[in-house]
């Protein structure tokens, strides 16, 4: 999750989704702003930010407040939304 390599992040996110392990929430939104794009066929065109936000959406079952898209630009409101929602969920 701490890798600067987009492929490593995307593979880790897929592993977490396959396991359905919610203990990884904090790692998914810890450093969400990873802009490098993967050119490997397994995750072609995805950046670390998008992989992490899609994983948070699927794992938590909480719909993102904005549409997740494939633009290079990241939207800080989505990462902040999940950080607040999941922190509240874990403290209850």
Image: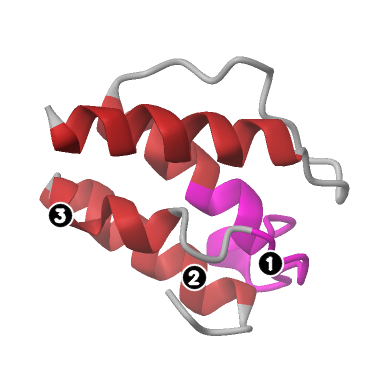
**43 w.r.t. 2: above or below:** above
**What residue is drawn where x is 59% and y is 58%?**
32
Magenta residues (range):
33-52
- Check disc 1 and report the residue beneath it: 34
- Of badges 1 and 2, nearer the viewer stands 1
Residue 11 figure quarter? bottom left
**86 w.r.t. 72: above or below:** above
Identify the main secondary structure in magenta: loop
**What residue is drawn where x is 72% and y is 41%?**
76
Which of marks 2 and 1 precedes in the sequence? 2
Which of marks 1 and 3 precedes in the sequence? 3
**What residue is drawn where x is 49% and y is 38%?**
54
- Check disc 2 and report the residue beneath it: 9
Q: Are marks 1 and 2 in contact (CB under 8 Å)?
A: yes
Q: Are marks 3 and 1 in contact (CB under 8 Å)?
A: no
Which of marks 2 and 3 precedes in the sequence? 2
Q: Is residue 8 magenta?
A: no
**What residue is drawn where x is 63% and y is 83%?**
4
Along the horizontal axis of the image, is 88 left or right of 68?
Answer: left
**3 w.r.t. 63: above or below:** below
Residue 33 figure quarter? bottom right
Q: Count the labels in the image.
A: 3
The residue tagged with tag 2: helix, strand or loop?
Answer: helix
Can you give x and y, in whole percent of width and height, for residue 16 in the image? 24, 56
Can you give x and y, in whole percent of width and height, for residue 62 in the image? 37, 18
Can you give x and y, in whole percent of width and height, for residue 2 in the image? 48, 81
The residue tagged with tag 1: helix, strand or loop?
Answer: loop
- Check disc 3 and report the residue beneath it: 23
Q: Quadrant of the C terminus?
A: top left
Badge 2: how crowded within 10 Å, few (<14), some, or many (20+)? many
């Amino acid at each position: 999750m701490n890798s600067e390599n987009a492929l490593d992040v995307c593979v880790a996110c897929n592993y977490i989704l396959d396991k359905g392990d919610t203990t990884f929430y904090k790692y998914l939104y810890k450093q969400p702003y990873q802009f490098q794009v993967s050119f490997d066929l397994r995750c072609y065109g995805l950046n670390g930010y998008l992989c992490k936000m899609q994983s948070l959406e699927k794992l938590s079952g909480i719909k993102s407040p904005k549409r997740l898209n494939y633009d290079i630009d990241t939207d800080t409101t989505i990462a902040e939304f999940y950080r607040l929602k999941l922190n509240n969920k874990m403290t209850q």
